[in-house]
Amino acid sequence: MDLNVDFAGIKLKNPLVGASGTFGYGLTYEKFFDLSLIGGFCTKGLSMKPREGNPTPRICETPSGMLNAIGLQNVGYEKFATKKMPKLRKISTAVIANFFGETMEEYIELAAKLDALEGIHGLEMNISCPNVEKGGAAFGTDIRVTEAVVKGCRAVVKNKPLIVKLSPNVADIAEFARACEGSGADGLSVINTLVGMAIDIKNRKPILANVTGGLSGPAIRPVAVRMVWQCYKAVKIPIFGIGGVASAKDVVEFIMAGASAVQVGTMNFVSPDIIPQLAEELPELLVRLGAASVSELVGVAHGG
Amino acid sequence: MQCTVTSIQSLAAGFFHLSLTPEKPLGPITPGQFVMIRCGESTDPLLRRPMSVADFEADGSRLGLLVQIAGRGTGTISRLDKGDQLDLIGPFGQGYSVPPEARTIVIVAGGTGVAPFMTLTPTLVSQGKDVHVLLGARTKELLLMEEWFLHAGASLHVATDDGSKGFDGLVTALMMERLDHMEEPPDMALACGPAGMMRAVAALAEHNNIPCQVSLENSMACGFGACLGCVAHVRGEKRYVTVCRKGPVFDSREVLI
Ligand SMILES: Cc1cc2nc3c(=O)[nH]c(=O)nc-3n(C[C@H](O)[C@H](O)[C@H](O)COP(=O)(O)OP(=O)(O)OC[C@H]3O[C@@H](n4cnc5c(N)ncnc54)[C@H](O)[C@@H]3O)c2cc1C
Ligand SMILES: Cc1cc2nc3c(=O)[nH]c(=O)nc-3n(C[C@H](O)[C@H](O)[C@H](O)COP(=O)(O)O)c2cc1C
Ligand code: FES
């Protein structure tokens, strides 16, 4: 069975990639399996400077999902490049650098650095980060700001595929997908977490110190599948389907909706070896569905 | 890792002990380390639950958990029967570490906080140390594993909030009393239990210049360093550490409890 996928020029040996913020810098998972068994992974969101993240509590379980307000804690570009990259270069899997900035300048500066960093196979822009210059509204929820930041990064990313990770917290995601494609994106990641919250009824206050958090896990899968479906109709560039993938069936569901590959997030916490497990189960399911490759199923649910 | 339940025993209302045999030995375990257990096969509840390893074989070929029913996950586990399967991963984290030169040790445990000390106490006693175990609970019925500690060769003192057995009051008040009784202050204090109790033990230990280790029970999504959800605040710094990886056992002066 051919599981190989060429995602906007990133060679994946299977369509299963670890999602940003759930996969550390990859190395955390080495004690569970050989990283060369998976298609690739997206790093924890990187910023120019290290970030300490939000106060606690940062997480809360919800029905078939969880809320997180980690606050984009990360080691920063320098430490990533000097401490993590030497180890990652020795591993035969695609390393996608997820990154964000608090200002337009930070996005562009970091994009240029990651484009030049040896061993990075692709860049994934997280545009769900609050824009400090615009009163904290996310870059990814104002279409003009989205276009500007994607164009800005595109201009400096010359060697590697540039993927934009869309925020689902918008009225019409297809409009954002088109704007990204029009601004030079090579691929899309759909979706980031949905804004949610939970209240501690005994203490009469929000559970998360940050009040709101990002909802992830199987609970969001139907929303994510719908958004992949809408984006597939809107653009030609490849799409990573993301949101609650927990089984080989879910992988196929995203692919049929229009994803060229999927990312697995929250379920890594529950079953740290879920990605290699899915890679093992997927061929069997594809055979049962009468498919000879992953690529022939991309978008089939849309009909001929 | 699939484990077979070899026994499940009720200890007091809402508390039970679970004995497990993993399909393959888990490898070496340090008291204070924990495992992440899956509560059923469904995605609701979704996340694994952290549980300290209580009693165990050195190579991890058998382990015991001491569980308090706190909600849905632990409720599901409480209904397991002998012969059933339980899925867990681990052991994870850094356990208690007692330096060889420490001669006198005070252990303070509340509720299921006795778990990490079940194996540690006899080990410390066998090393010739003078071990004082202080157990606290609301009532005498809720004092866990008293017999075990009686047989472990430590000097045992119990406290109950309602005075139904032993010292009448909080285990921290008992600790204060014991410290007064001791000719020399202990070389080390080890605590595990509710956050309020550990905070009080740490304050008391610090006041008396006794190094103290505590085990934090922050909520965890993964247990192995991937989510950054479990962090504790480093004292005096604007920095966090992962409880699952750098802890759960910390020097009490290092983190905010
Ligand atoms: C390192 C470590 C070691 C541990 N070791 C042990 C051990 O040895 N033994 C042991 O018994 N426990 C131990 N714990 C604690 C144990 O993990 C928890 O009790 C367990 O996760 C509870 O799961 P549950 O599904 O039963 O309860 P949950 O349903 O998750 O609820 C737990 C508690 O939180 C409250 N709660 C849940 N949601 C809300 C909400 N929205 N608002 C207000 N309150 C809420 C519930 O009322 C309940 O009291 C340990 C924890 C850690 C981090
Ligand atoms: C704890 C946690 C941290 C995350 N951090 C990031 C991040 O730094 N950057 C990012 O683009 N997405 C981040 N995400 C979003 C995931 O990559 C993914 O888009 C989302 O969780 C949905 O997928 P899932 O349901 O499979 O988890 C995070 C998710 C979780 C649960
Ligand atoms: S529980 Fe996930 S990092 Fe500690």
Image (cartoon, coloured by chain):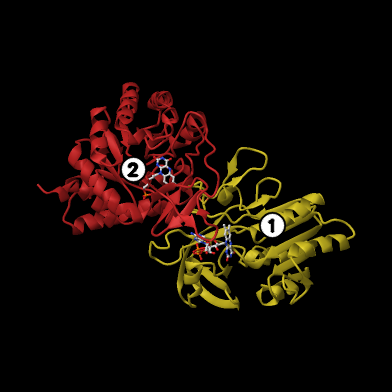
Chain colours: A red, B yellow
- Where residue B98 appears, x then y in whole percent? 73, 54
Residue type pointed to by label 2: Asn
- Where residue B33 appears, x then y in whole percent? 60, 57
What number is the disc on residue B94?
Answer: none
Q: Can residue B243 be seen in this view?
A: yes
Q: Is residue B93 left or right of residue A175?
A: right
User: Is there a contact, CB below 8 Å, between mark 2 and mark 1?
Assistant: no
Label 1 resides on the chain identified as B
Which residue is at 42% across, 67% downward? B40
Q: Quadrant of residue B116?
A: bottom right
Label 2 resides on the chain identified as A
Q: In this view, does A51 lie to the left or right of A109?
A: right
Q: Is residue A92 left or right of residue A232?
A: right
- Where residue B238 appears, x then y in whole percent? 61, 37
For residue B34, above or below residue B167: above
Q: Quadrant of residue A4?
A: top left
* The image quadrant in which ligand 1 is located: bottom right
What number is the disc on residue A169?
Answer: 2
Helix, strand, or loop for circle 2?
loop
Q: How many labels does the image show?
A: 2
Who is closer to the viewer here, A42 or A126?
A: A126
- Where residue A53 appears, x then y in whole percent? 52, 40
In this view, the residue farthest toward the left is A304
Q: In which quarter of the image is residue A103?
A: top left
Residue on which the image places disc 1: B198
